[in-house]
């Protein structure tokens, strides 16, 4: 259990329900924030879409493996489309799935949880015996407000159950009057801020919790301290038992000794704090120990909206704090002490750290700036403070390895694996951030597009990542790389480049290198003519597809020579310009040249096809028929190799080579420093930290 990720979240919707899938995507954005942002980073998966509209299997091939994490939450977003029984309906399949999922995740006993949600009246049909969370649109609200309120409500219940799983190991059975609510808020406030008209932030927040009937317990000194009880004892007990402290930072707050004591009590006990900035005029002196925590601003416009924002943020912050602790404990070494929040000077005053001199303290990313770390180490020279990114940056890189080629493009079957384009962009960016922080240059044979407003261009995102990571590199003690990207552009792609593309290479972010032009019997204008001032570079004729295939192979051979290893992930299996999917050809070139190859197939696409074949599974792509059925002008383009030259290697040929290599075992076949079990783990993983960690572990074991 300790080596498993702490939490997985499945957001399941009927593949053809636009509304339910949009809600799932919006929920994912609440639980998966950008890499190194310091926000929530819970692994989220959608419905694996196999084209049959049926729910995934439980603990089956290509389905949901509840035990792949210490805790798994399965959210089923039910609506009319999910329970439809007429033609093109799934019948009782989703109802049966919910019944089986609930049976496998019993409340009060299981480390996992199933949460059925009704988005409309039909959604209640998911279960007639268990509670189904009502999340119907409120007819008395404007559409945008109602949709946002519904999203927040679903998010709240997911977060509350996640908090219970991480805190208790299960979702406790409800016993009215005896079981405390899943979210415990300690409300720290100055009594002078309680206005008689009940419009003050403290009362507005309290009243909204009561009116919304949310399962939240709130600790107020006016209500929880018994007559005759000591303030200090009551505060200590309340702070120690809460999920999060809400501190309403008003004009009076910093001047009240009991408010200051509550904050210090929370920090000493390791309780998370959310500051509600409700200053109106200001204060003569701010309380210095109320920093180093998240802050939300009370807008003083619509008090109900403000209170809703505060409650929503508080619950997500409580989850982030508990998830950070669980995640760090799962990856910490035996000599590391976990801090679920960044350290500060006041942290060093408490005995729980003072007794552990000489220890390493692991806290969540992003790492503190150098100026903060220097102050902490001046106060306690024998202590060291690291984050997961810091540990990656301290990777002992073999001197002969400085560049890794990343073969990547968006998969066209992401939904089959319960992922989305947004998943792929976010998680792949995180992998590349880790590689950069480890001191590796990234070589990429990718496209820049003149119209940067269309789609998600990986090369542009990679350039922006390089610009942003230099600040992080300083925080982890790593020297930012100059020209951290080697962009090798294939002919004929760069024939269409102009000012928009060339300006991206200013500022030493990336080095540009054109790939060799293949030896063809035509000049550029003959095969890719200029019409109305624009050059046509589409692979829309046999001649042009042949030219593209030759140019792409030349680029892939050049980039293989210029790097010491290759990581493949994603990759199109349809709609590419050559005669072989790019990621497949690049993987094969590395294996042919005995270059270390890392196959991350969890994101589907061409990398998954390669990984499946290496795992002994049958893939139709590596046959003689598949390319003829899939690739336009395949036979005519292939015939041009015989007429005009070039070494053509078919998918069928590559498939035979991969199967032959598989017979030698993954460790020998991939030559990447990883053993059989580690390579299998890499092929199936979607965890960016795990993928980067395995790549660096393998490279660290390699000899020249």
Image (cartoon, rainbow, N blue to C red):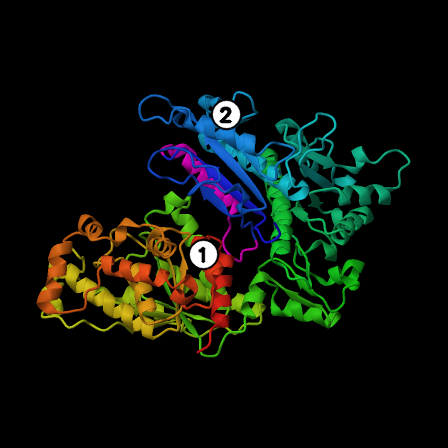
Residue found farthest to the right: 228
Which region of the structure is painted magenta? 16-38
- The image quadrant where one finds the C terminus is bottom left
Foreground residue among 314 and 332: 332
In the image, is residue 311 above or below residue 103? Answer: below
**Which residue does the numbered mark 2 point to in the structure image?**
138
Compared across the picture, whether 479 is left or right of 347 comes to left
Of tags 1 and 2, which is closer to the observer? 1
Residue 567's quadrant in the figure? bottom left
Compared across the picture, whether 648 is left or right of 164 comes to left
- Choose the circle earlier in sequence order: 1 or 2: 2
Are discs 1 and 2 less than 8 Å apart at CB?
Answer: no
Would you call the spot at circle 1 few (<14 residues within 10 Å), some (14-19), or many (20 or more)? many
Helix, strand or loop status at disc 1? helix
Residue 523's quadrant in the figure? bottom left
**Which residue does the numbered mark 1 point to in the structure image?**
680
Q: Which mark is residue 233?
A: none
- The residue at 29%/73% (across/down) is 558
Looking at the image, can residue 449 be seen? no
Q: Reply yes or no: does residue 37 show up in magenta.
A: yes
């Amino acid at each position: 259990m300790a080596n498993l990720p702490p939490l997985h979240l499945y957001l399941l919707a009927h593949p053809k329900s636009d509304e339910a899938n949009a809600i799932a995507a919006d929920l994912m954005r609440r639980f998966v924030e950008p890499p190194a942002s310091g926000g929530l980073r819970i692994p989220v998966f959608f419905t694996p879409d196999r084209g049959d509209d049926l729910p995934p299997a439980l603990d089956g091939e290509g389905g949901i493996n509840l035990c792949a994490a210490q805790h798994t939450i399965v959210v089923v977003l039910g609506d009319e489309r999910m329970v439809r029984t007429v033609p093109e309906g799934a019948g009782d399949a989703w109802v049966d799935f919910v019944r089986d999922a609930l049976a496998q995740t019993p409340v009060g006993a299981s480390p996992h949880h199933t949460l059925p949600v009704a988005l409309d009246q039909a959604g209640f049909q998911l279960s007639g015996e268990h509670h189904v969370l009502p999340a119907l649109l409120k007819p008395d609200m404007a559409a945008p407000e109602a949709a946002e309120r519904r999203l927040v409500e679903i998010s709240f219940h997911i977060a509350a159950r996640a908090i219970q799983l991480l805190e208790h190991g299960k979702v406790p059975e409800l016993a009215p009057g005896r079981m405390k609510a899943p979210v415990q808020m300690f409300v720290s406030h100055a009594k002078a801020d309680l206005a008689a008209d009940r419009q003050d932030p403290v009362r507005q927040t309290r009243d909204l919790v009561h009116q919304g009937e949310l399962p939240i317990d709130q600790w107020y000194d006016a209500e929880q301290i018994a007559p005759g009880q000591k303030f200090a004892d009551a505060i200590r007990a309340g702070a120690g038992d809460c999920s999060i402290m809400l501190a309403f930072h008003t004009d009076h707050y910093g001047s009240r000794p009991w408010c200051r004591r509550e904050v210090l009590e929370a920090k000493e006990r390791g309780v998370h704090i959310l500051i509600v900035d409700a200053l109106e005029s200001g204060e003569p002196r701010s309380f210095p120990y109320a920093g180093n925590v998240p802050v939300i601003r009370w807008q003083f416009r619509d008090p109900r909206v403000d209170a809703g924002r505060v409650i929503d943020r508080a619950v997500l912050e409580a989850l982030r704090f508990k998830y950070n602790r669980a995640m760090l404990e799962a990856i910490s070494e035996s000599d590391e002490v976990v801090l679920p929040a960044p350290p500060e000077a006041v942290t060093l005053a408490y005995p729980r750290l003072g007794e552990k001199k000489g220890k390493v303290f692991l806290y969540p990313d992003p790492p503190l700036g150098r100026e903060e770390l220097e102050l902490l180490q001046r106060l306690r020279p024998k202590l060291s403070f690291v984050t997961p990114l810091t540990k990656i940056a301290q990777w002992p890189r073999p001197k002969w390895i400085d560049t890794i080629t990343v073969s990547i493009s968006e998969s066209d079957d992401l939904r089959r694996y319960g992922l989305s384009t947004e998943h792929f962009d976010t998680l792949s960016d995180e992998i590349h951030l880790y590689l950069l922080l480890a001191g590796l240059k990234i070589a990429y044979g990718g496209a820049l597009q003149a119209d940067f407003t269309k789609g998600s261009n990986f090369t542009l995102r990679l350039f922006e990542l390089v610009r942003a990571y230099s600040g992080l590199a300083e925080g982890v003690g790593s020297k930012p790389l100059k020209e951290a990207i080697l962009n090798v552009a294939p002919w004929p792609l760069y024939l269409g480049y102009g000012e928009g593309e060339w300006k991206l290479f200013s500022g030493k972010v990336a080095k540009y290198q054109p790939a060799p032009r293949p030896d063809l019997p035509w000049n550029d204008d003959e095969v890719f003519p200029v019409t109305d001032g624009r050059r046509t570079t589409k692979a829309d004729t046999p001649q042009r597809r042949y030219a593209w295939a030759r140019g792409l192979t030349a680029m892939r051979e050049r980039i293989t020579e210029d790097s010491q290893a290759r990581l493949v992930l994603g990759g199109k299996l349809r709609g590419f310009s050559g005669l072989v999917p790019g990621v497949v050809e690049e993987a094969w070139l590395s294996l042919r040249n005995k270059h270390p190859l890392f196959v991350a197939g969890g994101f589907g696409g061409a990398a998954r096809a390669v990984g499946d074949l290496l795992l002994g599974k049958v893939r139709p792509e590596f046959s003689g028929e598949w390319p003829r059925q899939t690739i336009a002008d395949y036979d005519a383009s292939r015939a041009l190799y015989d007429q005009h030259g070039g070494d053509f290697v078919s998918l069928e040929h590559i498939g035979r080579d991969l199967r032959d290599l598989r017979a030698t075992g993954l460790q020998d076949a991939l030559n990447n420093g990883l053993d059989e079990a580690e390579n299998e783990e890499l092929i199936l993983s979607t965890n960016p930290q795990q993928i980067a960690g395995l790549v660096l572990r393998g490279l660290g074991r390699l000899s020249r």
